[in-house]
């Protein structure tokens, strides 16, 4: 029995498109620019919506840039966090923050499924829910505070890329088995906030959910898919690899304040 050959890994061009799509999909209403750096200032739980994305090298000296960012985050009641990706500018920012003693945390993989034309069949039936219901569902699974759930709802409602939230439920009891979102843009579909309640784990529900989400994305014209997963989440990584996702790139965060992870 011959195995189907593995598809080619994500190209640098696709990785760059995924980074842009991820920024678009996670944009909160609270944003500002400082000399080419994008500041996200949402009080929600997701760090990608409350961090600095250093998109351009800028002209200010680094200490001045950090001081301006620090003031903006402090005024929003948030710790200063910088997200470091292969696309970060200046390219040596990570090394320079390390010299300053900033802690590194939340190592994350961005994975891509290059083609969606080879999906296994899916019989799972998902229920689409509104943004408020989805944020409440995810918030309860995360243990989020009410303010964080409200911020998540606000971000979903205000996103330029409409989020589609889905629940996989037991057909008889209607109890939650898994949940996830799609953010579709220009042929790319991002899978976000994929969660399985602890009591329902290791039963194949996440696989059913992801397959159903990918089928829905393909029906909407998506040709590629991507997702983000913690580098220490071996079970989720194994699941995504079994679905044909491959590493596109990694990112992490740095902060000068201990304990913000």
Image (cartoon, rainbow, N blue to C red):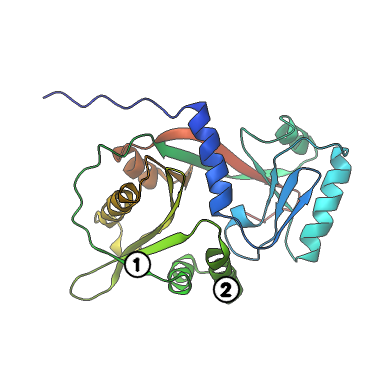
Disc 2 to disc 1: CB gap under 8 Å: no
Q: Position of residue 134 (x, y in %)?
A: 43, 69
How many numbered marks have been drawn onto this rendered protein structure? Answer: 2
Question: Is 195 or 186 nearer to us in this picture?
Answer: 186
Quadrant in the rendering for residue 234: top left
Question: Is 30 or 149 nearer to us in this picture?
Answer: 30
Mark 2 falls on what kind of element?
A: helix
Residue at the image point whose x is 60% and y is 56% from the top: 27
Image quadrant containing the N terminus: top left
| Label 1 packing within 10 angstroms: few (<14), some (14-19), many (20+) | some
Q: Is residue 2 above or below residue 139?
A: above
Asked whether, in this view, residue 63 is left or right of residue 8, the answer is: right
Residue at the image point whose x is 48% and y is 46% from the top: 228
Res. 251 mark? none
Quadrant in the rendering for residue 174: bottom left
Residue at the image point whose x is 20% and y is 51% from the top: 122
Q: Is residue 151 above or below residue 117?
A: below
Q: Circle 1 sits on which residue?
A: 128
Asked whether, in this view, residue 103 is left or right of residue 191, the answer is: right
Q: Circle 2 sits on which residue?
A: 150
Q: Is residue 200 visible?
A: yes
| Distance from Cα at disc 2 to Cα at disc 1 | 19 Å
Q: Position of residue 170 (x, y in %)?
A: 23, 69
Asked whether, in this view, residue 146 is left or right of residue 114, the answer is: right
| Mark nearer the N terminus (2 vs 1) | 1
Question: Is 103 or 49 nearer to us in this picture?
Answer: 49
Q: Position of residue 241 (x, y in %)?
A: 34, 38
Residue at the image point whose x is 18% and y is 56% from the top: 123
| Label 2 packing within 10 angstroms: few (<14), some (14-19), many (20+) | some
Image quadrant containing the C terminus: bottom right
Q: Position of residue 201 (x, y in %)?
A: 31, 58
């Amino acid at each position: 029995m011959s195995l189907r050959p593995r598809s080619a890994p994500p190209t640098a061009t696709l990785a760059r498109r995924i980074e842009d799509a991820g920024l678009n999909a996670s944009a909160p209403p609270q944003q500002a620019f400082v000399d080419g750096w994008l500041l996200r200032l949402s009080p929600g739980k997701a760090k990608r919506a409350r961090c600095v994305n250093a998109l351009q090298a800028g002209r200010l000296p680094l200490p001045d840039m950090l001081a301006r960012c620090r003031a903006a985050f402090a005024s929003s009641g948030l710790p200063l966090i910088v997200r470091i990706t292969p696309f970060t500018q200046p390219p040596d920012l990570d090394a320079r923050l390390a010299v300053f003693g900033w802690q590194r945390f939340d190592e994350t993989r961005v994975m891509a499924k290059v083609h969606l034309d080879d999906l296994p069949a899916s019989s799972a039936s998902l229920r689409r829910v509104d943004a408020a219901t989805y944020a409440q569902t995810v918030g309860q699974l995360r243990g989020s505070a009410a303010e964080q759930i409200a911020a998540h709802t606000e971000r979903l409602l205000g996103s330029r890329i409409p989020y589609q939230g889905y629940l996989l439920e037991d057909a008889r009891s209607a109890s939650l088995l898994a949940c996830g979102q799609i953010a579709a843009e220009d042929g790319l579909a991002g899978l976000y906030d994929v969660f399985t309640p602890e009591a329902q784990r290791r039963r194949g529900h996440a696989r059913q959910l992801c397959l159903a989400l990918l089928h829905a994305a393909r029906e909407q014209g998506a040709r590629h898919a991507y997702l983000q997963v913690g580098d220490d989440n071996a079970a989720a990584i194994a699941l995504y690899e079994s679905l044909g996702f491959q590493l596109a790139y990694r990112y992490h965060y740095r902060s000068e304040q201990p304990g913000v992870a």
